[in-house]
Image (cartoon, grey):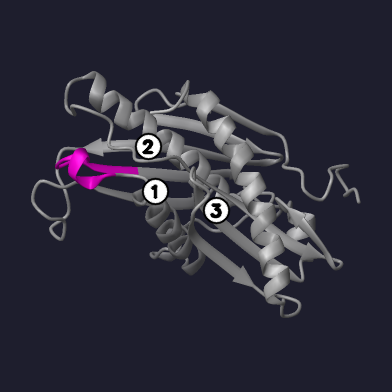
Amino acid sequence: MTRKDGRAFDELRPIKITTDFAKFAEGSCLIQCGDTMVLCCASVEDRTPPHVAEGEGWVTAEYSMLPRANRERSKRDVSKLKLSPRSAEIQRLVGRSLRAAVDMTKLGEHTITVDCDVLQGDGGTRTASVTGGFIAMALACRKLVERGDLAESPIRHYVSGISAGIVDEQPMLDLQYSEDSNAQVDLNCIMNELGEIIELQGTGEGRACTPAEQQELVRLCAKGNRELLSIQKEALGGKF
C-alpha cells in the first residue's frame, strides 16, 4: 500500500538534520521530517535545581510552536500568560526522554536545557523534538568534554522517537498531518539504541485497538527508530 506522498506504509518521511544550526547554543540542530521542522538548541548552566542531589546534573526541555507553524496562526503562549496544556505535556515528554539517555553523576552539577521550537508542523513534532533534542544535547555534552568541564561524555545511549497509527484500517509509520488528523489509532514511541521502550503514548482516537494492533504499531516504530538511530549516528559522527 502506498500513501498520499507515495511512501510505503512502513517508510519514514525524508529526514534531514543540520547540526550547529544556531551560533550561540552549546549544541543545536535543525531536524526536518518531511514538512515538519524543529529547531533544537541545548544550553548549559553550571548549576542545578534545588531538588537535584549534590554532585549530580539535570536535563530538562521546553517546547513551543511558532505562531505560523501550522495552517492557521496560533497565539504565542506568552500572550496567554501561561504555557498551553499541549506544550506543557510535550515538553515533559521530551525532558523525560532525554534524561533517560544521561548518567546524571557523570554530568556533574550542570543543567542542560533543550529548547524545541517548531518552525513548521506537519505531524510528529513531539517525536522530532526528541530525536533532534537528543542530538543537540549530545553536542552540548561533547563541548563540555572538549573544554575540560567533564572527564567523559555522560551520554549512556542514543534516544529517538517516532509515531505510528492506523488510518483506514491500515497500520502506518510516521504519520504526516493529513494522516494523523484522520487516524483511528495514534501511537508515539520513544526508544533507546538497545530497542528498549522509554515511553509509549497511545490513543484510540477513532476506535479502540487490540493488543495485537498495538504490538504491530510498536513493531513499526521499532523499525523507524532503528533507522533514525543510523541517521543520528551519522549526524554526530559516530557512537559515543
Labels 1, 3: front one: 1
Query: Residues at badges 2 and 3 in contact (C-beta under 8 Å)?
Result: no
Residue at 60% of width from left, 41% of height from top?
226
Q: Is residue 14 above or below residue 163?
A: above
Residue 112 belongs to magenta span:
yes
Q: Would residue 158 be found to the left or right of residue 102 on screen?
A: right
Q: Secondary structure at mark 3?
A: helix
Residue at the bottom extreme of this rendering: 208
Given the image, on which type of amino acid does mark 1 rest?
Answer: Leu
Residue at image mark 2: 137
Q: Residue furthest right?
A: 1
Sooner in the amino-acid sequence: mark 1 or mark 3:
1
x 36%, y 51%: residue: 100
- Is residue 238 toward the left or the right of residue 104 in the image? right
- Name the element at disc 2: helix
Q: Gap between marks 1 and 2, in whole Å?
A: 8 Å
Amino acid bearing label 2? Met
Q: CA distance from mark 1 to mark 3?
A: 12 Å
Query: Which quadrant would residue 109 be assigned to in this image?
Result: top left
